[in-house]
Amino acid sequence: MTNPPANVSAAASADAGRLSRARRELLVNLVVREMKARYRGSVLGFLWTLLTPLFMAVIYVFFLRVLAGRGVPMEEILIGVFAWQFTVQSIHSGVNCVTGNANLVKKIFFPRSILPVSATLANLVGYALTLVVQLVLVAVLLHVHGRALSPWAVALPAVIALHTVFNLGLAMTLGAANAYFRDTQHIVNVATSAWFFVSPVMYNLDLLASFAAGRPWVMDLYLLNPLAVIITAYRALQLPGAAFPWTAWSAAGLAWPLAFAGLAAWFYRRAQRNFADVL
Amino acid sequence: MNAIEAQGLGKSYQARGYAPPTLFGAAMRRLRRQETPRFWALRGVDFEIPAGRTVGVIGPNGSGKSSLLGLAAGTITPTEGAVRTRGRISSLLELGAGFHPDLTGRENVFLNAAILGLPRDDVRRRFDAIVDFAGLREFIDMPVKHYSSGMYVRLGFAVAVEMDPDVLLIDEVLAVGDIAFQLKCLQRIREFQQKGKTLLFVSHALQTVEEFCDEAFLIHRGRLVERGPPADVIFRYIRRYMGEGGHLFTQEFGSREAEIADVKFLDAHGREATSFESGRPMHVDIRYRAARRIEKPVFGFALKTGNGFYLHGSNTQLAGWPLDAIEGEGVVRLTFDPMILLQGNFFLSLSIHSWDHAVQFHRREDWYPFSVRNPTGAPGLIHLPVRWERRPAG
């Protein structure tokens, strides 16, 4: 992000190379700070980021079996829960990325875009680490049933990249909004709970398809939810025999997070000018 | 070549309540069609600061000094006009901003340096210098949440000055830490000046401004009302604005049959001055003008500290130096010898009244500011003549 137009720093243009390196270092430092601060002072540390989705997955499988009488395979739920966790954590740190650093924003000039970016990257690093465990668990579960991880799993980074861009868009939008309206975080909590149920975390598209039979528009609309297509894409790449439901709607669901992130960046850039006034 | 330039610089804020802004509140205001009033923290400010100059910004609380620094630092976006800076800027607006309480001092040094834009290799090279300057070697691997506030600020200052900026912005942060650390900070500021760096600093410590700055800006109600040599600007600041909204209200009243026409403050050498050395004489020449012959007038004075604390008052009647009569113009000299006030800013009130105190001819309340310097460095407000001696035991 550039300086605000009114504050033209000659040095900024003179040694832009040196400055961008400094910004990269700042980004790395903030990501490290976020991760260190998150895991320090808790006995299990990083293990918690693994245990939380694992417990969630077990609970969902159990209750779906008991209550609904039908279940979704454990490996599908694992994939859904770990991916969901990445977005939820990005939202949580994103909402607070500006207000939580009020001191910094008010007193020191630095590119403000670093705040949501570092918050999202810290979560990406955490997700990448848990993903290794998730892949092993899914592979083991598949092996028990005499199957193996799909070779398409090598394409996972593409989905992760899209997922990260989407989460970054959320972090920028919510972080900026929360700076101006402090009740954003409460609204976000409610919205997140609702979002959980309209995303295929503890169920899959097959389950929804039986419900949507005869009402095709339900599925079309459903696929506009970026998390629906992203989680489904994760499953399609890891599980043998699962296919991504290519339709115009699902393609739109994959594409529009990119447009959303671009819009979010524009919104954030405009909003950041007055951060110091509202914090 | 100017290091900082401002043109038509202005910043306005929405005057809001104390609670943090909420969407709910905004919606309610929209429903009730309430306009949120805006107020200008700073407006129409033009100046240019040549590279290598040290400028002190003074003014009453809430006059817009900190906004000016925030605008120069780029943390605040101007509402109108523009401010341009050349070179690397470091701001000591808040020391230790961005420290994370759970991280150790060492980790925070690297983090804070990164926030300030200092490359990691440079920090590694200068790490020992930073830690030694802060004097925190044995605590550097401890989480900063266990630091005292002084330690916190010391580490923040050490990192900020290590950045070696071209322009340094300082907001009232030199009044931190113990005296030893303050001296170290001031020493570092002098080194900056010697290296030809530009400094812009806000301070209520007028003495410091007078001592360090090449120029002073006086800001009042968001306007740059005065700029010039520090001593002059400070003097006019005290004279004009110190009373306003504070403890002091300069006022003037009386029948004016006899009036105080002109007052001169003179030092031991008979030179006009506004600042006096403790322990040396101070003369106040009061030129009066009497419209008619006045029998047995009384000249009086009162002394207050800058905070409005009444120190002493007396007059020619109490002093046993009665005047028989005055008519036309003349001069009465009031001498403080030695000046036993030690240091600080003071206000002198002068009056001419009748022998029986029934008629106030002319009184100027808290009208004349002056300051006293203390060459010895002894603490306190006044010098009391004391004596020490040995006495036989029992």
Image (cartoon, coloured by chain):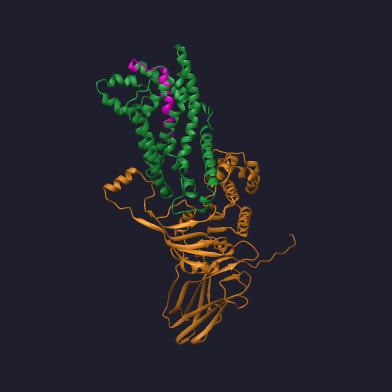
Chain colours: A green, B orange
A139 or B16: which is nearer to us? A139
Is residue A193 among what the camera can see?
no
B331 or A179: which is nearer to us? A179
Over which residues does the magenta segment extend? A67-90
Q: How many marks?
A: 0
The image position of residue B307, as x and y in percent, is: 50, 63
Residue A88 included in the magenta stretch of the image: yes
The image position of residue B167, as x and y in percent, is: 55, 55
The image position of residue B64, as x and y in percent, is: 45, 58
Is residue B249 among what the camera can see?
yes
The image position of residue A23, as x and y in percent, is: 52, 43
Question: Eyeballing the image, is B353 above or below B165?
Answer: below
B387 left or right of B106 in image: right
Question: Eyeballing the image, is B108 above or below B295?
Answer: above
A126 left or right of A68 in image: right
Question: Eyeballing the image, is A195 above or below B18?
Answer: above
For this orientation, the residue located farthest to the top is A146
B283 or B110: which is nearer to us? B110
Give residue B214's quadrant in the image. Answer: bottom right
Give residue A54's quadrant in the image. Answer: top left
| Magenta-drawn stretch, dominant element (helix, strand or loop) | helix
